[in-house]
Amino acid sequence: MPLSRRFTPPMSWLTAFEAVARLGSVTDAARELDLTQGAVSRQVQKLEDAVQAPLFQRDRKRMVLTPQGAAYADRVRKAVGEIAAATIALQANPEGGALNLAILPAFGAHWFAPRLPDFLRAHPGITLNLGTRTEPFDFSQEEFHGAIHFGADDWPDTGALKLWDEQVIPVAAPDLAAGDVDAITTLPRLQLQSRPWAWDCWLETHGLTPAGAPAMVLDQFATMAQAAQSGLGVALMPDYLVEQDIARGKLALIPGAKPVSVGAYYLVWPQSGAAYPALAALRDWLATLCKGA
């Protein structure tokens, strides 16, 4: 629910307060804002009256923030900075806007990036900025408009669009993959750190019981694929990530193994930012692209 406008002081009061808080002087703040000292002092006083709390201690010519004032100044500075950044972004790109998106490393490199040219050609006014995140995060503490998330639709305080179910298959170096699917229970297994449930899910689907814990835990699919190619164990990999390695003979599918879904990919976004135009454009494009996937 949006806050009442009565809790939003005029921007002139806030900019005067922020300048005095940062510079510690009404004189310096007035010079920076091209106002008179009296005008700056009045705006700060009006703000203090509105919030009903002393924001400064007057120490001769210096203005020293009270504890309440320091906490308030930090919040105000961030808000004013966001407004300035949004204005700069709009001036630089009035037809689209920046879209800051968090992506998963392997998904971004192997599935998302090859398809991005089509999106950017269809939306030339959008500037897309990508950052890597492997775990859910608090959107209020980040500058992302959305994120590509793997797992389930359980990210708090977000909207979500399911893209597609990921299918995982067990692969190994060709000489290690010579046995049948039952041999997996005795072979060393490689596990991705962020998906500790994957092997249990896959083995249960095949009616198998593992012998002991995975031999090695890795934090990236790329590293796990290299470890599998080196003969260190069987890796449970998304099929789209190892298609080329299988075709080139670097990896082999364990005979008799079937693909199993252990989660899905989602586009997620903060509920408060659902209508952001650049995000809405990406959401519509992904919904069409992944329809029926």
Image: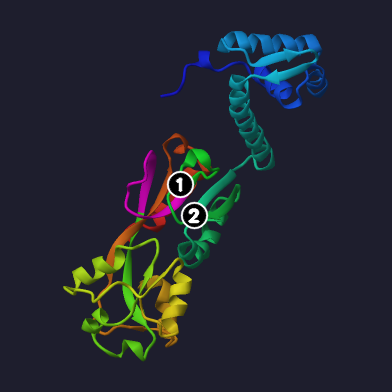
CA separation, marks 1 and 2? 8 Å
Q: Residue at x 69, y 42 (%)?
A: 92
Front residue (pair 152, 116): 152
Indicate whether residue 133 is drawn in magenta.
no
Front residue (pair 134, 84): 134
The dominant secondary structure in magenta is strand
**Count of marks placed on residues:** 2
Residue annotated with mark 2: 133
3 is higher (above) or lower (below) than 293: above
Left or right of 273: which side holds 34?
A: right
Query: Which residue is the extreme one toward the front?
Result: 59
Q: Residue at x 67, y 9 (%)?
A: 45
281 is higher (above) or lower (below) than 207: above
Indicate whether residue 152 is drawn in magenta.
yes
Magenta residues, as a range? 147-162
Residue 293 percent across, percent down from the top left: 33, 61
The residue under label 1 is which amino acid type?
Phe
Residue annotated with mark 1: 137
Picture quadrant where residue 58 is located: top right
Q: Residue at x 78, y 9 (%)?
A: 38
Residue 219 percent across, percent down from the top left: 45, 66
Answer whether labels 1 and 2 touch (C-beta < 8 Å). Answer: yes
Residue 274 percent across, percent down from the top left: 44, 38
